[in-house]
Image (cartoon, rainbow, N blue to C red):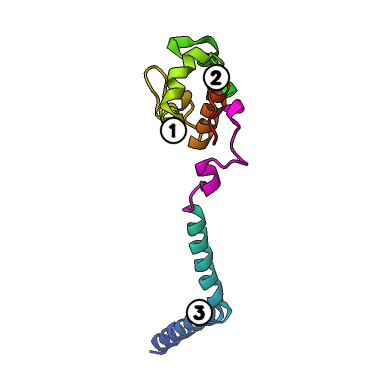
């Protein structure tokens, strides 16, 4: 019977030692655990998520650029050289030649506003804005003014 009692005591002692070790580990873990780091890591994760779902780029158009400001827009001559010269210099597809008073006279008689609308929207074989969609309406109007005044008109802007 003495042997059985020793086995029980040894078993109980083993359980106590094992429990003390596990309890000590749990106590040390609890004491050294930084609850704030978990909260800050959540904040960091959330901020990283917000950063990752941001748009790649933003486009902003100022009112002046959208309308084609006088200071930032191209002059009539610049627009003519960039978009109109090819057809109106050679008279391609019945386009009135630059400086040809006779060819421009019936068009000038229609008035400045009509010429501008035709240039912006296109007419017959001429594409809208002379084929350059990036031009503002004001830039196209400046080109019409330049071309028509160079061909006998006396329009004022």
Report the label total.
Answer: 3
Of residues 56 and 106, the one drawn nearer to the viewer in this rendering: 106
- At label 1, counting other C-alpha atoms closer than 10 Å, the crowd grade (few under 14, some 14-19, many 20 or more) is few
**Residue at x 54% of width, y 40% of height:** 68
Numbered circle sitting on residue 26: 3
65 over 11 or under it: above or below: above
105 over 74 or under it: above or below: above
Q: Nearer the viewer, mark 2 or mark 3?
A: 2
| Residue 59 is covered by the magenta coloring | yes
Q: Which circle's residue, 1 or 2, is located before the other in the chain? A: 1
Task: State the SS at label 1.
Answer: helix
Q: Marks 2 and 1: in contact by CB < 8 Å?
A: no
* Image location of residue 107, percent across then percent down: 44, 21
21 over 86 or under it: above or below: below
Numbered circle sitting on residue 41: none
| Residue 54 is covered by the magenta coloring | yes
Task: State the residue position of label 1.
Answer: 113
Q: How much space separates mark 2 and mark 3, taking CA atoms?
A: 95 Å
- Is residue 95 visible in the rendered image? The answer is yes
Q: How much space separates mark 1 and mark 2, taking CA atoms?
A: 16 Å
Q: Marks 3 and 1: in contact by CB < 8 Å?
A: no
The magenta stretch is 53-79
Q: Which circle's residue, 1 or 3, is located before the other in the chain? A: 3
**Residue at x 60% of width, y 33% of height:** 74
- At label 2, counting other C-alpha atoms closer than 10 Å, the crowd grade (few under 14, some 14-19, many 20 or more) is many
Task: State the residue position of label 2.
Answer: 151
């Amino acid at each position: 019977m003495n042997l059985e009692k020793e086995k029980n005591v040894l078993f109980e002692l083993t359980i106590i030692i094992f429990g003390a070790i596990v309890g000590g580990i749990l106590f040390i873990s609890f004491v050294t655990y930084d609850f704030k780091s978990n909260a800050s890591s959540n904040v960091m994760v959330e901020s990283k998520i917000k950063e990752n779902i941001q748009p790649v780029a933003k486009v902003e158009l100022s009112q002046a650029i959208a309308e084609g400001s006088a200071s930032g827009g191209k002059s009539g001559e610049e627009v003519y050289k960039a978009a109109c010269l090819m057809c109106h210099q050679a008279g391609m597809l019945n386009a009135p030649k630059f400086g040809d008073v006779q060819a421009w006279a019936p068009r000038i008689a229609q008035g400045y506003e009509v010429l501008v609308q035709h240039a912006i929207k296109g007419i017959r074989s001429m594409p809208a804005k002379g084929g350059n969609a990036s031009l503002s309406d004001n830039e196209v109007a400046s080109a019409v003014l330049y071309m028509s005044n160079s061909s006998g008109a006396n329009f004022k802007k």
